Amino acid sequence: MYRTLAVAAILAALPVAAGAQQNERLPARATIPSPPPAPALPPVPNVAPGYRAPNVHAGAARIVGIAAQPVVGIALGDAIAMALLKNPNLAIAAGSRRIAFYGIEAAKGAFDVRFQLEPDFERSIAAPQNPFFAGPRYGPVVTASQSVAGSVSGVLPNGQSYSVSLSQTRTTNNEIVNLLNPTYVTALSFVLTQPLLRNAGMNGPRRDVELSVINANQTQEQTLATVSDTIGQVEDSYWDLVSAWRNVAIQEEALREAVAQQRSTIRLARNGVGAPVEAVESGAQVDADEAAVASALQSVATEQNQLKSEIAAGPSDPVWTANLVPTSPVLRVPPAPALTRLVQEAMQNRPEIRQTLDAELQADVNVAYARNQLRPQVDLKLGYTTNGYAGSLLPLTPSNPLYAFVCPTAPCTFAVPPPLLGGAGQSYDTLLQQRYPYWNAGVIYSLPLGNHTARAQLGQALEQQRDAQIALQATEERVVVEARNALQTYESALSRLQAARAARYASEVVYASEVRKFRNGTSTTFLVLQRQVQLAQNRGIELQAQTDLNKAVVELQRVSGAILSANGVNLETLGSRALP
């Protein structure tokens, strides 16, 4: 009685819980609830009348499509190398990269020097115009000329255009007033056009070259991003295959332990020590473990096919018939990097960041070109030509109508300047002496009224520039998120592996103890089988934790961008063996 009063006094002295109302009452004594009403279930129709599982006889567990022996060991580095050399997706990516670099060569073609050669032959027969411009005996004027003209021209990166041409013409005719026949005319010309506003510095050909270079860089970065993802996938597939094979070993070990337990219970039952139902119980566990082994082999086949699809050069590659078994040990566990350092490395090494930076550069080039096109066109044009001339002197006789004008009195002497007498060589000589020069200079001014095209191009370029900046910000944010997730996954994988390893060790100890107690007659088959199942499960959990840790290390390498340098990626040989 005194004890009851003391307890009541202590309870009355306890403070009221935080947030409780002062007038709150203690709940009444619990009562037994009423049974719930029967659930309203829909009627099940007669589905597949007479259905029952068929009696099947499965053969030995195997992996379809491969030779079980010999086993082909494959290291992780070899798997990555095969993927880099033989993966069709990487071969296509490498081809796109080469195509992009050919685009640079095509764009540079705008600055190629163009050589042109034009030989020409002409012959004309014209009616006589007057006695001075007629053929012999007032006949038709027959003129024949052979000419050849050559030129080189081109455009310079800063917008200048140039042209250098050289021509030579040999002309013969039968005009009676000719003093020189045949004649040789040569000309050497230089023309330079210098843009002063529009197309000065930034112009269409230069923009095309710069954009093609940026596009090639973008394609290369995209290729590197594809390579990074592919290496990560190969490594993940490799560790999944490791896990699958080790899971087969776990399930086979569980099967052997179940078989040993079954034999023990059968022997005890036959000796009258154990109940026959325990032998049936242990047999059911053997059947379950056999199914687990078959399921584990199916996982091996699935993971092998996944890895082979990433390293094979096509459906006819011999690797498809190989029984691949990983030989590389688990990855070395690196120390957890600081988040800021991981993000910094990712910003420096990730090809996706450089790709978005290239997009921003592309937009900057388009903006600069569009602003340039808003200027008026003011071009300075300079030209210089030096001419050469020579010919063979015809004899001047009294029968020539020109004789009376040249020689009004006798005796007649008429001298042609020596530089004009001769053949083609003499014509070139007078050309080089610049006896007959010609030069010109001019300004070309042009401005389309309204200039709508250039204004629209500038608007598009500014929008492209804005989109590139937004894309860069989004990419940087995505990289930061990936870095955070990768680091968190890595640290969680470390903790889960530590816990799983401790749980597996404890299960082994408990199972061994339960087996000893069973042999001493202080345990049951049910408890032994239960410990077996728990041990197999904890072994599988530890295996999965180890696999997840390996994948977490791979993800850290991928996120930081170190996965490319760590695997010695060579873009020149990428996909070079994609065809078997």
Image (cartoon, rainbow, N blue to C red):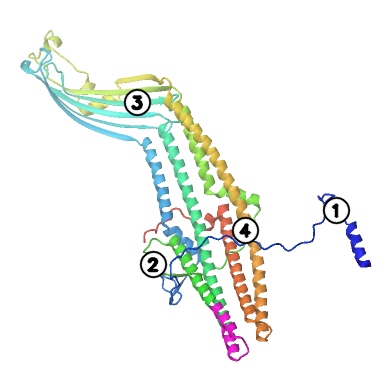
Residue drawn at (45%, 38%), measured in percent from left and top? 210
Q: Three-letter amino acid code at disc 4? A: Tyr
Q: Give the residue number, with chain letter if any, for mark 3.
A: 191
Q: Is residue 277 magenta?
A: yes
Q: Residues within 10 Å of mark 3 (few under 14, many from 20)?
A: some
Q: CA distance from mark 1 to mark 2?
A: 78 Å
Q: Three-letter amino acid code at disc 3? A: Val
Residue drawn at (65%, 51%), measured in percent from left and top? 339
Q: Three-letter amino acid code at disc 2? A: Pro
Checking the image for residue 331, the label placed there is none
In the image, which is nearer the foreground, mark 1 or mark 3?
1
Q: CA distance from mark 1 to mark 3?
A: 103 Å
Q: Give the residue number, with chain letter if any, for mark 2.
A: 318
Side (left or right) of 301 relative to 556:
left
In the image, which is nearer the foreground, mark 1 or mark 2?
1
**Residue 98 pos. (x, y %):** 40, 48
Name which quarter of the figure residue 123 lies in: top left
As helix, strand or loop, the secondary structure at mark 4 comes to helix
**Residue 351 pos. (x, y %):** 52, 48
**Residue 107 pos. (x, y %):** 39, 38
In the image, which is nearer the foreground, mark 3 or mark 4?
4
Q: Residues within 10 Å of mark 1 (few under 14, many from 20)?
A: few
Side (left or right) of 535 relative to 66:
right
Checking the image for residue 490, the label placed there is 4
Q: Is residue 260 above or below residue 550?
A: below
Q: Residues within 10 Å of mark 4 (few under 14, many from 20)?
A: many
Magenta-highlighted residues? 262-286
Q: Are marks 4 and 2 in contact (CB under 8 Å)?
A: no
Checking the image for residue 16, the label placed there is 1
In the image, which is nearer the foreground, mark 2 or mark 3?
2
Q: Earlier in the sequence, mark 2 or mark 3?
A: 3
As helix, strand or loop, the secondary structure at mark 1 comes to loop
